[in-house]
């Protein structure tokens, strides 16, 4: 009877310990962090409303596909200034490497570009997302993507700052979903071994 109880208790502890460590790599998928890469002065800053909406849409697409996503603002809040923008790629990688609970395996660095050109009767809007998928431990690039808006995006000719921001922000879903589809394919092809 005592031996049976010890065996059952050992089995329960094994299941509990396995469940706790499963947070690190749930479902065999790597831990991801999506960040706004805004070191290029031509990009929108990572805290811009368009950038935030793009990153949120991308995160949602990956979450739906079952990836382990961790919010960079929540994880880095205690260590790094939250309001800082224009971080270099090296700084973004250093931040990701410094996170240990949970450890981040893959960094998805996304840059958002937007511009508007006034014509006689309308404002032509262009937007572009570029991104790099980087293995945090060794800096190995796992892939990249670039998605550009169709040339048909327009806004009224008298549409300036807030109007333009809202117009692009409302249309960003299309770009972010396309980027999400590409990212899902890319991430599904990453080997599960955390050391490579």
Image (spheres, grey):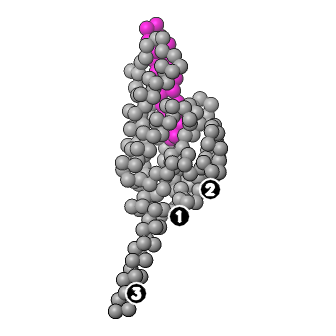
Alpha carbon distance from label 2 to label 1 = 16 Å
- For label 2, the crowd category at 10 Å Cα-Cα, with few meaning under 14, some 14 to 19 and many 20 or more, is some
Residue at figure coordinates x 46%, y 62% from the top left? 23
Q: Is residue 115 above or below residue 39?
A: above
Where is mark 3, residue-wise? 6
Residue 6 % position (x, y): 40, 87
Whichever of labels 2 and 1 marks the residue nearer the N terminus, that label is 2
The magenta stretch is: 109-131
Q: Is residue 75 above or below residue 125?
A: below
2 or 1: mark nearer the eye:
2
Picture mark count: 3
Where is mark 1, residue-wise? 195
Residue 72 % position (x, y): 54, 47
1 or 3: mark nearer the eye:
3
Secondary structure beneath dot 2 equals helix
Residue at figure coordinates x 39%, y 21% from the top left? 152
Does residue 112 belong to the magenta stretch?
yes
The prevailing secondary structure element of the residues shown in magenta is strand
Quadrant into which the N terminus falls:
bottom left
Alpha carbon distance from label 1 to label 3 = 36 Å
Where is mark 2, residue-wise? 98
Q: Is residue 157 visible?
A: yes
Q: Is residue 142 visible?
A: no
Locate residue 10 relative to residue 49 in the image: left or right.
left
Secondary structure beneath dot 1 equals loop
Does residue 68 belong to the magenta stretch?
no
Alpha carbon distance from label 2 to label 3 = 40 Å
**Residue 189 found in image quarter:** bottom left
**Residue 172 found in image quarter:** top left
Whichever of labels 1 and 3 marks the residue nearer the N terminus, that label is 3
């Amino acid at each position: 009877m005592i031996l049976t109880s010890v065996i059952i208790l050992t089995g329960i502890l094994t299941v509990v310990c396995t469940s706790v460590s499963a947070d690190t790599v749930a479902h065999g998928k790597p831990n991801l962090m999506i960040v706004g890469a805004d070191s290029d002065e031509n990009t929108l800053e990572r805290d811009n409303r368009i950038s935030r909406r793009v990153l949120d849409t991308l995160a949602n697409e990956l979450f739906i596909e079952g990836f382990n996503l961790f919010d960079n603002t929540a994880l880095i809040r205690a260590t790094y200034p939250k309001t800082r923008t224009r971080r270099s790629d090296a700084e973004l990688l250093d931040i990701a490497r410094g996170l240990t609970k949970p450890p981040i395996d893959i960094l998805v660095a996304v840059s958002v570009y937007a511009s508007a050109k006034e014509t006689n009767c309308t404002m032509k809007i262009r937007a572009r997302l570029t991104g790099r998928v980087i293995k945090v431990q060794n800096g190995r690039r796992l892939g990249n993507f670039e998605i550009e808006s169709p040339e048909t995006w327009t806004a009224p000719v008298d549409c300036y700052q807030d109007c333009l921001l809202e117009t692009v922000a409302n249309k960003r879903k299309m770009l972010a979903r396309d980027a999400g589809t590409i990212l899902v394919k890319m991430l599904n092809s990453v080997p599960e071994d955390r050391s490579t």
